Image (spheres, grey):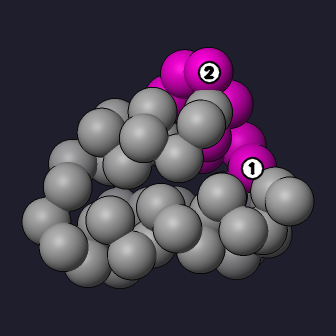
Amino acid sequence: MLQNRLFYSLKLLEEGFSINEAALSSGFADYTTYLRAFKKVFNCLPSDF
């Protein structure tokens, strides 16, 4: 489930969404929670994409 939300957020980032918009649209409560989950799964930051 977490990975599905993160992959969805990647799609949004590729479409030009800001990191914050992608995080909130993917169902994360806030930017910090999203960053922690993203780094844990992908071992990098969303800004690297």
The location of residue 34, given as percent across then percent down, is 61, 40
- Disc 1: CA contacts within 10 A as few (<14), some (14-19) or many (>=20): some
- The majority secondary structure of the magenta stretch comes to helix
Which residue sits at x=62%, y=21%? 29
Which residue is labeled 1 in the image?
37
- Disc 2: CA contacts within 10 A as few (<14), some (14-19) or many (>=20): few
2, 49: nearer the viewer: 2
Q: Does 7 sit above or below residue 26?
A: below
Q: Which stretch appears magenta?
A: 29-38
Q: Does 31 sit above or below residue 19?
A: above
Which residue is labeled 2 in the image?
29
- Amino acid of disc 2: Ala
Q: In this view, does 26 lie to the left or right of 2?
A: left
Task: State whether residue 44 appears in this view.
Answer: no
- Tell me the CA gap for discs 2 and 1: 12 Å
Q: In which quarter of the image is residue 10?
A: bottom left
- Amino acid of disc 1: Ala
Q: Does the magenta stretch include residue 30?
A: yes
Q: In which quarter of the image is residue 4?
A: bottom right
